[in-house]
């Protein structure tokens, strides 16, 4: 199923080696398999959207790709390093090349916005405080929050907190940027602004981006390619237009927003995460 992205002129740089590669990737919780032998490649400079409904496994896939979840089978390579076999030092080196913007922003409430963004730089570099201050201002400007470094997260709107989270994810100038539900909980206008920000970041930097979402409008706007998950399986993988025109029954059900007649997905999803945990 893995495929190299097609040349679309000015969108995806040509690079034969994948930046992220998954082969036979499976993840299980408490004996219940959540992801079922997924195989795909993600190439330099492209934006890949992981699309799917609740319980599809997209958040589990994200956690596995950034090394927060151990697969039960298969392999994940980031920049040629197998995360399933990597040492603690190798994992640390890879994570310094990754930026992650969490779904709710995950800003530390006791720190000012600027201090949140400076945190990765303080933890992982030996830069002087004056240099870090300059970098914080640059990152805030890049996400449209210039001048907000002394605000507390509680003083920001939902969209502004998302942007601040993006700035923190950019702090270390990562090669790979992960977004977890970047427009979740936002009104349509604010969500559109977040989509525009992702597109602008793509134009400004040669970063590889992986975006996890269930928002169809956002997905087809920002994606070069889409991975559509259904119950832990890849049911579509390809360029956004190709996925949008798919005739696969489960793909069409998701894209056309047709209710599942079984009515038991939410119950199964809850059991999936609670069985064996007690």
Image (cartoon, helix red, strand yellow):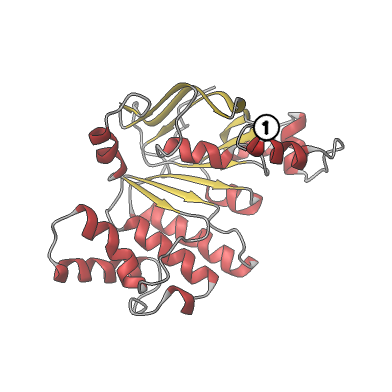
**Residue drawn where x is 44% and y is 36% of the image:** 65
Classify 56 as above or below 1.
below
Classify 49 as above or below 28.
below
180 or 194: nearer the eye? 180
Q: Quadrant of residue 78?
A: top left
**Residue drawn where x is 52% and y is 75% of the image:** 157
As drawn, is 248 to the left or to the right of 137?
Answer: right
The percent position of residue 22, horizontal first and vertical second, equals: 45, 26
**Residue drawn where x is 43% and y is 41% of the image:** 46
Query: Which residue is the extreme one toward the front?
Result: 278
The percent position of residue 3, horizontal first and vertical second, equals: 49, 25
Where the C terminus falls, by quadrant?
Answer: top right
Where the N terminus falls, by quadrant?
Answer: top right
The percent position of residue 52, horizontal first and vertical second, equals: 64, 41
Identify the residue under disc 1. 231
Classify 209 as above or below 141.
above
**Residue drawn where x is 37% and y is 78% of the image:** 148
As drawn, is 4 to the left or to the right of 235?
Answer: left
Q: Secondary structure at mark 1?
A: loop
Q: Quadrant of residue 54?
A: top right
Classify 81 as above or below 178.
above
């Amino acid at each position: 199923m893995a495929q190299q992205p097609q040349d679309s002129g000015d969108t995806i740089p040509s690079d034969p080696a994948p930046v992220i590669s998954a082969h036979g990737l499976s993840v299980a919780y408490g004996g219940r398999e959540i992801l079922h032998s997924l195989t795909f490649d993600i190439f330099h400079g492209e934006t890949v959207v992981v699309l799917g409904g609740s319980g599809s496994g997209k958040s589990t896939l994200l956690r596995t790709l950034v090394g927060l979840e151990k697969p039960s089978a298969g392999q994940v390579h980031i920049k040629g390093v197998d995360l399933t076999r990597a040492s603690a030092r190798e994992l640390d080196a890879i994570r310094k090349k990754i930026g992650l913007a969490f779904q709710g922003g995950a800003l530390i409430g006791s720190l000012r916005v600027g201090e949140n963004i400076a945190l990765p730089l303080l933890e992982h570099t030996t830069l002087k405080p004056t240099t870090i201050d300059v970098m914080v201002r640059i990152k805030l400007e890049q996400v449209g929050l210039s001048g907000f470094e002394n605000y507390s997260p509680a003083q920001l709107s939902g969209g502004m907190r998302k942007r601040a989270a993006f700035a923190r994810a950019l702090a270390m100038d990562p090669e790979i940027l992960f977004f977890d539900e970047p427009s979740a909980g936002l009104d349509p206008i604010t969500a559109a602004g977040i989509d525009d920000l992702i597109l602008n970041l793509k134009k400004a930097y040669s970063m590889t981006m992986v975006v996890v979402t269930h928002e169809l409008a956002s997905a087809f706007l920002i994606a070069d390619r889409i991975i559509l998950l259904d119950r832990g399986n890849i049911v579509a993988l390809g360029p956004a237009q190709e996925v949008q025109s798919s005739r696969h029954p489960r793909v069409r059900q998701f894209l056309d927003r047709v209710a599942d007649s079984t009515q038991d997905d939410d119950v199964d999803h809850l059991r999936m995460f609670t069985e064996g945990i007690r």
